[in-house]
Amino acid sequence: MKFSLGLLVLLLGAALVAADRDYEGYRIYEVIPSTIDQAKLLHQLSFEGFDFLSESRLLGHPSQVIVSPEQLEQFQQLLEAHQIDSSVVNSNLGASIAEEFAQRQMQRLLSPITGKGRLSNERYYNHEEIINYIDDLAKRYPHRVYVKTVGWSYEKRVLKTITITNGDGKAGKKVIFLDGGFHAREWISPAAVLYVIDQLVEQFEQNAHLLQDYDWVILPLVNADGYEHSQTGTLARMWRKTRQPYNYAGQTCYGADPNRNFAFHWNEEGASSNPCSDTYAGPTAFSEPETIVVRDLMHSLADRGIMYLTIHSYGNYLLYPWGWTSDLPDNWEDLDAVARTGAEAIENATGTVYTYGSSTNVLYIAAGASDDYGYYAGFNVSITMELTGAGSIGFNPPVTRIDEFVTETWIGIRAMAEKLLEMY
Ligand SMILES: *[C@@H]1O[C@H](CO)[C@@H](O)[C@H](O)[C@H]1NC(C)=O
Ligand SMILES: *[C@@H]1O[C@H](CO)[C@@H](O)[C@H](O)[C@H]1NC(C)=O
Ligand SMILES: [Zn+2]
């Protein structure tokens, strides 16, 4: 390896612990590797405490990484020494977070919680509002919609699925299982899932063909605790994990990465055993009550499971198994055809380009993720969708653009469901 390990060791000292912080003076860099050595070097940083908001292994594809004031000088030296193409996309993350919160406070005054009827795409909702919304849909559409309590988060927030049918009463239809909100800070994920619910329930006539042969089971918010935590204030905005406390070397660090906590090649690659890391796999597989809920849903639905789809942010990717190895599953051509259809439909409609492929071959190897588990559990197709990023923080577009992003996401999801109808 040509790159300087000396610099990496220096950087190690400034490792970022997953904790609440104000991000004052932190920058977001976009880095674009053009050689394999550069890509390897950048990837190494993700093990040295650098928080990557989006990270691809494809040469020429941008990744975004947070750099603290303490890390800055060495990081810049590293970029220079290895001539890595880079630009600063945010020169003070803390200021952007503060600004976003101020806008959010205002928005709440302008569009207060009603808990009734269609949620607008004008702001991001909290756990209670999301639960109220699906409960209300079940009351208004009792023939087509069914809400079920499927468990509780670590902090005892209720987790509910909404099952959407066409009301013909036929049992045993194939199932599309959709979830969102695995990672707390990715607020656009539950927003996009709520829009899917709206389309399938309120815009039923236009989408009846998607409910003819399939029922949709949707868990809009997996990591309810983390999501609520990320909404408590500016310090918590970048929270990613769940909220169960773990002790480590005399300190308490919170949460595991729910998308590294599944018992399929658990903690083999691309996850951390350190509870203070953002990619902590947990002390054991399924240590988190939230991932147990998803696991049990998968097993209960798998014999009818046509597709498992999980919504994350960001980077514009449609990814399929495997994530634990660079090998491809037997029916990878089917998976590829579904992902390609979603990407094409979005590009045709909006011009946004999604990259598709297997997780390991597009991103980096990462074991214990829910898409691998869903495929292993028996879903014929399993896809992780990383939505478009926008705005100064990336994970959630400014509220003025939610509508644009969730409608784009729906175009891709609808096209993938239509492709499945052709295939199976
Ligand atoms: C999954 O694929 C297999 C093989 O093509 C097929 O027999 C099975 O019916 C499919 N599962 C569902 C739920 O459609
Ligand atoms: C996208 O547009 C191309 C060119 O018009 C067309 O061949 C293709 O079927 C479209 N794909 C989808 C999924 O809409
Ligand atoms: Zn995510």
Image (tube, helix red, strand yellow):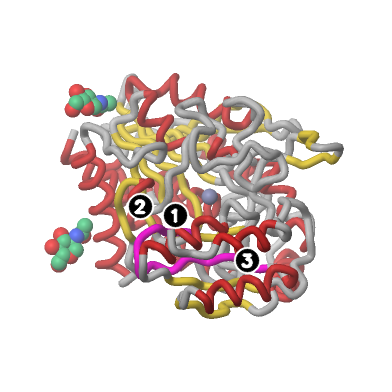
The residue to which callout 1 is attached is 386
Specify few, some or many for label 1: CA neighbours under 10 Å numbering under 14, 14-19, or 20 or more: many
- Residue 206 in view (yes/no): yes
Question: Residue 189, relative to residue 150: is it above or below?
Answer: below
Specify few, some or many for label 3: CA neighbours under 10 Å numbering under 14, 14-19, or 20 or more: many
Which badge, 3 or 2, is on the more N-terminal residue?
A: 3
Q: Amino acid at mark 1?
A: Glu
Q: Nearer the viewer, residue 256 or 133?
A: 256
Task: Confirm whether the magenta stretch covers residue 345.
Answer: no
The residue to which callout 3 is attached is 66
**Marks 1 & 2, CB-CB < 8 Å contact:** yes
The residue to which callout 2 is attached is 318
- Residue 51 in the figure: left or right of residue 254: left
Element marked by disc 1: strand
Which badge, 1 or 2, is on the more N-terminal residue?
A: 2
Element marked by disc 2: strand
Q: Amino acid at mark 2?
A: Leu
Quarter of the picture containing the N terminus is bottom left
Q: Nearer the viewer, residue 200 or 143?
A: 200
